[in-house]
Image: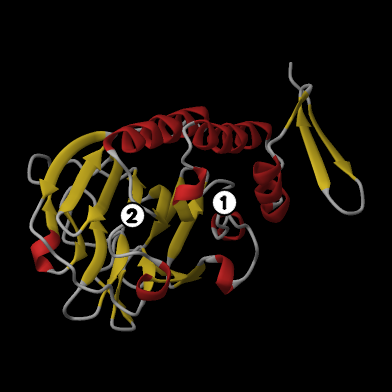
Amino acid sequence: MRILTRRDTGLLTQWTFGTAAVDADAAAFISATGITDATQISAINSLVADLKTYNLWTKFNALYPFVGGTATTHKYNLVNPADTDAAFRLNFVGGWTHSTNGAQPNGTNGYANTFLNASTVLSSTSVHISAYSRTLTVGSVVELGCFNGTNFVHLRTAANAVIGSTSSILSYTTTTDARGFWIGTKRADADREGYRNGVSQVTNTTSDSAAFPNLNLFIGARNDSGTAGVFSAKQLALASIGSSLTDTEAADFNTAVTTFQTTLGRNV
């Protein structure tokens, strides 16, 4: 049996799992959230290690693993687990259900503000957004995004992703099952692609240099010019925002996330 050990030095809480030290970035997240469950700690540590092995760790502005089962643990950004707006810590608004399977908005008024402004933080030629859905129903809802009336950064699992203007639409038309890990990415003005479980589903090569909205991205709904709308009721087990992903990187990200969800017993 592997034993989880915690040692407080006064400056830093150090964790070991068995005889192996927990990755420093994983340990910072564990310390911030207060998670003590050995399986959850192992899953977090492995996710961080896998992302670093695949050279993906620096791809994220925000990565929300929704682990720990409470609003407090779910609010933290894995890559910068400070309890501040500047660290893109989530602020949950309205109705949410938090469990060990993830975070689920109520579909009517529940959303989370990421405090991540699409215009000032993201690059219009290198961006990705992702969401891991544990809910089958598709629906005309948005899991992650913002819209200023003209341009978008949004993701509808099993429906579409839009990163730019309406000419940037990536339409998923081959499934009525919204479960799984969905990624939308833009690598250049004429290079956008959507993935499900690491496999390409759709591309769009129409040139689009539209500026991103000067709005924070919301999770569980879309930020429509400052007001939450298009509310989702999907249970999310992970979401991320960051720079663009290649085919290989999308596949590797999916592998890391699948391992993470499997360890937690909530993969779909």
Q: Which mark is residue 78?
A: 1
Identify residue for label 2.
129
Q: Residue at x 68, y 32 (%)?
A: 38
Q: Residue at x 41, y 51 (%)?
A: 239
Q: Residue at x 14, y 55 (%)?
A: 190
- Is 252 on the left-hand or right-hand side of 209? right
Q: Residue at x 78, y 37 (%)?
A: 15
Query: How many residues crowd mark 2 within 10 Å: few (<14), some (14–19), many (20+)?
Result: many
Quarter of the image with the C terminus is top left
Location of residue 126 in the rendering, given as x and y in whole percent from the top left corner: 32, 56
2 or 1: tag closer to the N-terminus: 1
Residue 267 visible somewhere in the drawing = no
Location of residue 84 in the rendering, given as x and y in whole percent from the top left corner: 62, 71
- Is 4 on the left-hand or right-hand side of 118? right
Q: Tag 2, which secondary structure? A: strand
**Identity of the amino acid at label 2?**
Ile
Query: How many residues crowd mark 1 within 10 Å: few (<14), some (14–19), many (20+)?
Result: many
- Is 96 on the left-hand or right-hand side of 41? left
Location of residue 61 in the rendering, given as x and y in whole percent from the top left corner: 48, 58
Location of residue 245 in the rendering, given as x and y in whole percent from the top left corner: 33, 45
Q: Is residue 79 above or below residue 19?
A: below
Q: Which mark is residue 210?
A: none
Q: Tag 1, which secondary structure? A: loop
